[in-house]
Image (cartoon, rainbow, N blue to C red):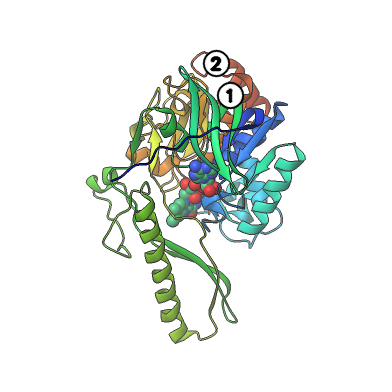
Amino acid sequence: MRHIEEKLSTPIKYECDVLVAGGGFGGISAALAAAREGKSVILTDRGFILGGLATAGLVTIYLPLCDGFGRQVSFGLAEELFRLSVSECCNGKRGFANWIACDDKTKRGEGFPRFEADFNPQIFAILAEQRLVSLGVKLLYGTVAVAVNKSGDRITEVIAENKSGRFAISASSVVDATGDADIAFYSGVPTKSFGQGNVLAAWYYSNTGENGYRLHTLGASDVPDEEQAKGKKASARLVDRRFSGLDGEEISEMCILSHAATLSDLRKRRESDPSIEPTTIATIPQLRMTRRIDGEYTLGTDEMHKRFDDSIGMVSDWRKRGPVYEVPFRTLYSGAVKNLIMAGRCTSVTDGMWDIMRVIPCCAITGEAAGIAAAISSDFTLLDVTELQKKLVSHGGVLHENDIKT
Ligand SMILES: Cc1cc2nc3c(=O)[nH]c(=O)nc-3n(C[C@H](O)[C@H](O)[C@H](O)COP(=O)(O)OP(=O)(O)OC[C@H]3O[C@@H](n4cnc5c(N)ncnc54)[C@H](O)[C@@H]3O)c2cc1C
């Protein structure tokens, strides 16, 4: 391949305390948490709507905050954003009736829907935007983080591009909420990609006279190799191909296949219901797991019910009732770059655990901790974890399984 040499002189257009790259659930949570600590926060997203996969990707099922046996395990911003997501738009499905609309605790355990809900992506995106703007967060849409400038083991600026051109944002701490660990990768932090690759997904909404507004979840889920080795069977795939999500050409091919699968599904449905119309298709690639950091600690599926002194909150397993994991702060950063922290689906976990940690409530848990950490420190290897934990608890967080009040 031929190369050209570019000569660049990049203006430092913005300065802030905390820069959040990526505005999915990880980034929204991080920006909210950092702004509530009184810091100046800039959030950049390559798209033009907040929520990432959960809104532009039409993944509108807020998976459980509970363990499936009646105990809520995820709190803080994971719960605040859950309530925001259903505040103006609940269609009453899943756990709304027994967890949100009714206090009867006898209706929350086994045999009942879990603490989860369907939400409307457009309303959530606007409500989240208004909440961030009201806290003074500067939102830069259509702004892709493309590189970093470093001094030793610290990021001094993140380089971004948007309609105005190429510019730098200087920040004391940086939260990587890109979902793909882009900033970590640009900074030279050790990363790992998802060995198994992603199956094709094509989630879309339709409307019909008969069935109303409806989500279709083609390529609904995958089973990690780790679980398949234990005998769990994966469902049929839309195409016999997997996607890393880290190659521009491959992502484009994946989107084209996803669009084709949508149209073909729609045509099939039209045979029995001629009134069906697609109302929304995803405007972001529906990739579950791509790249993550290889951080100070890597959490695995066998560590359920284990106490971690540096826990920043808990998550459950959306796939089955029972397992609860405390999330160690050390899964959010690598000592290789001192002022960079991860939020959302790119923290340090094994491939099997990734399938648990990638979902919405978990992204909010890591996002909130990353945002507060970025507000109180710019060297995560030296951060006083007790101070971070105190702040998380003061905002409603619960850190250890033993601390859950039943
Ligand atoms: C098909 C599918 C089904 C799923 N089903 C569910 C489900 O039912 N329930 C559930 O809870 N979870 C589900 N998930 C997982 C969940 O939706 C996501 O993992 C989660 O929303 C990720 O949040 P995030 O903030 O980490 O990342 P993302 O939502 O990916 O957000 C990252 C954001 O960063 C932006 N960005 C990326 N790179 C850059 C860059 N370089 N510069 C600037 N901005 C950038 C993107 O535009 C995006 O807005 C599903 C995922 C998929 C793909």
Q: Residue at 55% x, 84% y: name it.
A: 275
Number of marks: 2
User: Above or below — where is 76 with respect to 277?
Assistant: above
Under circle 1, the secondary element is helix
Task: Identify which residue, 63 or 205, lies in the foreground.
Answer: 205
For the question of whether residue 372 can be seen, the reply is: yes
The amino acid sitting under disc 1 is Ala
- For disc 1, the marked residue is 373
Q: Quadrant of the C terminus?
A: top right
For the question of whether residue 406 can be seen, the reply is: no
What percent of the width, then of the height, locates residue 354?
Answer: 39, 40
Q: Residue at 63% x, 56% y: name it.
A: 97
Task: Identify which residue, 382 or 368, lies in the foreground.
Answer: 382
Q: Are marks 1 and 2 in contact (CB under 8 Å)?
A: yes
What percent of the width, then of the height, locates residue 205?
Answer: 54, 68
Q: Residue at 30% x, 55% y: name it.
A: 242
User: Above or below — where is 147 with respect to 278?
Assistant: above
User: Above or below — where is 181 with respect to 62?
Assistant: above
- For disc 2, the marked residue is 383
Q: Residues within 10 Å of mark 2 (few under 14, many from 20)?
A: some
What percent of the width, then of the height, locates residue 80?
Answer: 66, 41
Quarter of the image where one finds residue 71: top right
Task: Identify which residue, 337 or 228, lies in the foreground.
Answer: 337
As drawn, which residue projects farthest toward the right? 134
